[in-house]
């Protein structure tokens, strides 16, 4: 059986205790809201897209250590990156979470997930995959908003 | 029969299984209960020896199956002291039973501007169908608020009931454990000219039920929470009310006649039982009813009061201000279902840690999001106890809680 140490890695707990980029962004930044119907977690992701770059990103809401730390790590991973690269990181993360819908897509090894690799252990706790991906799916929704 | 939890536990095979070499501590019975051997045997025995369609075929096997199915109806009528067995309607779960009564009775009796009274502690199954009627026919909803200790605030009940057509409420909160004064609420509703729908999912499995004494008009509950199989819900209603209601689902079994230009319905309860039901599950439910009757519902209630007392004493003594237990502190006013917040640890994380020692609790909004909002939480952890739970399991819960603090 997978032990809790696989799930609650120190870096994860660190982002949970001291979340990065927590807060809100004013318009013209856009936002999207995500819910985890299973546990009632709520998250809102704000992004500011300028000249094809995600120039700033924030999140707020409430949720478990996995959803909150994953969102926090996500913000540090995508901030300042071109939209296309952000989408690639999201895809790579979803592949790691085994929920990439495109089964034929190959893994883009050039993308380094860095600290996010710590979330790999979540896969051993399938119920928690939804927690880990909540912020990421919401980020995709926010990107759609920013295209409008 | 005297109540002995050690003997009771022998009847529930799953409680003896080890998970990762450790015993199972099942504290999620408000969600769904475990099954005694007699129910498991009844299910497989019927499948092996008696399975056949009901109400449709003349051969002996089918006639016997129909008898067994109807025997459960009678057993349930006795269990809740319903005047007549044909007032008991089988559905697929309590949610469907609530939808049936809300939609059917609502269609016949509610028009735009009519008001229905609910409470702030309802399960989504007793909220969403009403919202659907709001959208469909412009009815209005009113709500009984809560006191700070999670009881219904009945200060303005008569005012709230003024002009109300129906009062639909839970007999026991699946989140707070609060047991509501059903008899009093039914009497007040009737005085105001309203009918009552009682969501008794959390009380029928745990204490004696007498629909006549309670004075309810409709009552719903689920087989799977009372030691029976899943796939079966129960609606009880006064015969005259059921007869005056239009059918809910249309199809086989619910008709007296079908022509090219229309249909006439069968008598109650067939009118509300369209299609092939969960035949074997209904049959096995009768063994659950028999089992609970033999144990004695007064004994079940007494055991749960003792457990509740132990839970409150233990958790408060060990954790003091680190734990916030929602709902009434008097064990006489509550069932053995406890939602709580613990040391700021998110419920999802907490339940994950408890699972390491096989302590099975529910984390989430418990299908009562409006209530969660009032509690100021997105989620809680809920430990719920039943006739087979022990004080040792309360200790196991407390030990597991303690270990969670080391991580976060
Ligand atoms: C108070 C209450 N009402 C309704 C329900 C719905 O029951 P079911 O899931 O069997 O339809 C439940 C159980 O989940 C409940 O606790």
Image (spheres, helix red, strand yellow):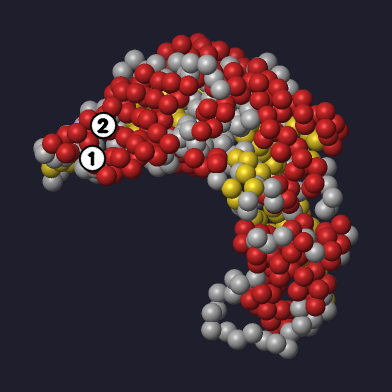
Q: Which dot marks residue B50? A: 1
Residue B312 in view, yes or no: yes
| Image vertical order of residue B22 relative to residue B162, above or below | below
> For residue B161, what is the image quadrant?
top right
| Image vertical order of residue B185 relative to residue A115, above or below | above
Mark 2 residue CB less than 8 A from any atom of ligand 1: no
Q: Chain of mark 1?
A: B
Q: Residues within 10 Å of mark 1 (few under 14, many from 20)?
A: some
Task: Name the element at disc 2.
Answer: helix
Q: Nearer the viewer, residue A26 or B349?
A: B349
Q: Which dot marks residue B68? A: 2
On screen, residue A123 versus residue B387, left or right, reads right
Residue found farthest to the left: B58
On screen, residue B48 versus residue A16, left or right, reads left
Do the residues under discs 2 and 1 have CB atoms within 8 angstroms?
yes
> For residue A105, what is the image quadrant?
bottom right
Residue B385: percent from the left, percent from the top?
Answer: 61, 32
């Amino acid at each position: 059986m997978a032990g809790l140490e696989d799930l609650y890695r120190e870096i994860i707990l660190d982002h949970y205790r001291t979340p990065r980029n927590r807060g809100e962004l004013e318009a013209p930044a856009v936002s999207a809201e995500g819910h985890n119907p299973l546990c009632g977690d709520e998250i809102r992701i704000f992004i500011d897209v300028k000249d094809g770059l995600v120039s700033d990103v924030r999140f707020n809401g409430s949720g478990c250590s996995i959803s909150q730390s994953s969102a926090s790590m996500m913000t540090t991973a995508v901030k300042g990156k071109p939209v296309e690269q952000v989408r690639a990181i999201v895809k790579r993360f979803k592949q790691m979470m085994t929920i990439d819908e495109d089964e034929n897509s190959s893994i883009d090894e050039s993308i380094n997930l860095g600290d996010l690799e710590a979330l790999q252990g979540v896969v051993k706790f399938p119920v928690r995959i939804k927690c880990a991906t909540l912020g990421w799916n919401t980020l995709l929704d926010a990107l759609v908003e920013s295209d409008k | 029969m005297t109540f002995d939890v050690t003997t009771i536990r022998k009847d529930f095979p799953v409680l003896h299984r080890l998970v990762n070499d450790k015993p199972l501590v099942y504290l999620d019975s408000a969600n769904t209960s475990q099954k005694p051997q007699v129910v498991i045997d009844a299910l497989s025995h019927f499948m092996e020896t008696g399975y056949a369609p009901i109400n449709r075929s003349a051969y002996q096997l089918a006639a016997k199956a129909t008898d067994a199915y109807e025997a459960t109806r009678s057993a349930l009528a006795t269990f809740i002291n319903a005047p007549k067995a044909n007032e008991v309607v089988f559905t697929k779960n309590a949610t469907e039973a609530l939808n049936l009564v809300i939609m059917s009775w609502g269609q016949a009796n509610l028009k735009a501007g009519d008001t229905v009274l609910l409470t702030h502690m309802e399960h989504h199954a007793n909220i969403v169908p009403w919202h659907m009627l709001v959208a469909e026919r412009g009815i209005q909803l009113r709500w009984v608020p809560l006191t700070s200790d999670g009881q219904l605030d009945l200060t303005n009940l008569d005012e709230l009931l003024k002009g109300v057509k129906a009062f639909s409420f839970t007999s026991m909160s699946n989140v707070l454990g609060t047991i509501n004064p059903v008899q009093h609420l039914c009497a007040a509703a009737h005085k105001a000219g309203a009918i009552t729908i009682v969501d008794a999912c959390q009380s029928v499995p745990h204490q004696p039920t007498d629909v006549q004494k309670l004075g309810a008009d409709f009552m719903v509950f689920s087989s799977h929470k009372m030691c029976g199989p899943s796939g079966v819900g129960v609606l009880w209603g006064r015969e005259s009310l059921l007869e005056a209601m239009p059918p809910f689902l249309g199809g086989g079994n619910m008709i007296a006649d079908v022509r090219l230009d229309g249909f006439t319905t069968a008598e109650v309860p067939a009118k509300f039982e369209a299609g092939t039901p969960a035949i074997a599950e209904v049959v096995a439910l009768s063994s659950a009813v028999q089992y609970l009757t033999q144990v004695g519902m007064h004994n079940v209630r007494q055991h749960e009061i003792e457990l509740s007392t132990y839970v409150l004493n233990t958790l408060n003594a060990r954790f003091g201000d680190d734990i916030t237990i929602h709902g009434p502190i008097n064990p006489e006013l509550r069932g053995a279902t406890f939602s709580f917040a613990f040391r700021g640890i998110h419920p999802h994380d907490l339940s994950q840690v408890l699972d390491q020692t096989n302590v099975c609790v529910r984390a989430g909004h418990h299908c009562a999001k409006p209530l969660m909002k009032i509690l100021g939480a997105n989620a809680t952890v809920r430990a719920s106890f039943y006739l087979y739970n022990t004080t040792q399991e309360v200790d196991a819960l407390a030990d597991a809680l303690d270990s969670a603090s080391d991580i976060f």
